[in-house]
Image (spheres, rainbow, N blue to C red):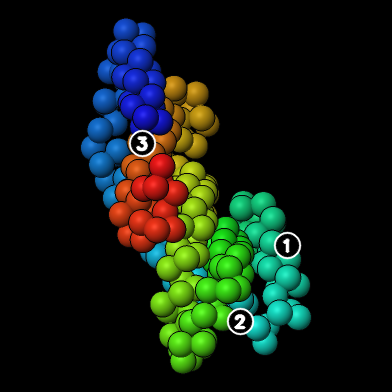
Amino acid sequence: MPYLVLAGIAVAIAAGLWTSGLGADVLRYRKDIVYLTKQHVVLVAVSGSAAIVLGIAIGIWLSRPWMARWAEGAIQAVNMVTSIPTLGKLALMMSLLGIGALPAIVGLWIATLLPIIRNTYEGIRAVPAHLVDAARGMGMGPSAVLRRVELPNALFVIFAGVRTAMAVNVGTAPIAFLIGGGGLGELIFTGIDLQQHGMMLAGAIPTALLAVAVDFLFGQAQYWLVPQGVNPLRNS
């Protein structure tokens, strides 16, 4: 239902743009849109994939019993780093790694980590203790308990963190243009600078559509990959 509402809004916006004449201005940049969207997708895919892999790994590590004393402090440290304005993180990466796609990917990767780490940690820690005790009573070792009990029960919460992180990633990626990372930010910021509304919308509209598409794909993955018994979307 939310996606049907968004589709209706998109149709209304498209109709408004076409009747106002801005639609034709946006279409003038269709070749640039295709080329820069590919760059944008690469930035999001590389930085997002790295954040998902490392974020889940760190979240699992912090959830282990021997890390209980330091887990909250570690998450707060990550929170402090993540709370630095994205432009500041990108500027720092530029000073360390130069100009181009690499510092942009590293900056986006850092900005994406926190929701994944936090949700993985909290999701695993929220698994009912009696399930873990029952698994241990059946003779499962720590790795088997994690793989067969904790992760399946925490997967819905982990996916929620991934969806949030990827939405942040897609929406933040246009700033990568400011340090030579490419992407749709080139049309957005150039359009703002030149006061060309068509050019600005040619970058902003695909960015918004890409964010919705990414959220939809991860939402479908969350619906189908999370086991039915612990998936409120499939139990309702």
Residue on which the image places disc 1: 80
State the separation of the CA atoms marked 3 and 1.
Answer: 30 Å
Foreground: 226 or 177? Answer: 226
Residue 101 in the image: x percent, y percent?
43, 61
Q: Is residue 123 above or below residue 146?
A: above
Q: Quadrant of the N terminus?
A: top left
* Mark 3 neighbour class, 10 Å CA radius: few under 14, some 14 to 19, many 20 or more: some
The answer to which quarter of the image holds residue 148 is bottom left
Q: The residue tagged with tag 3: helix, strand or loop?
A: helix
* Mark 2 neighbour class, 10 Å CA radius: few under 14, some 14 to 19, many 20 or more: some
Which label lies toward us, 2 or 3?
2
Residue type at mark 3: give it: Leu
Residue type at mark 1: give it: Met
Residue on which the image places disc 2: 64
The answer to which quarter of the image holds residue 94 is bottom right
Residue shown at the point (49%, 53%) measured from the top left: 160
Q: Is residue 153 above or below residue 133?
A: above
Residue type at mark 2: give it: Arg
Foreground: 6 or 98? Answer: 6
Residue on which the image places disc 3: 209
The answer to which quarter of the image holds residue 121 is bottom right
State the separation of the CA atoms marked 2 and 1.
Answer: 22 Å
Question: Of the residues under marks 3 and 1, which one precedes in the sequence?
Answer: 1
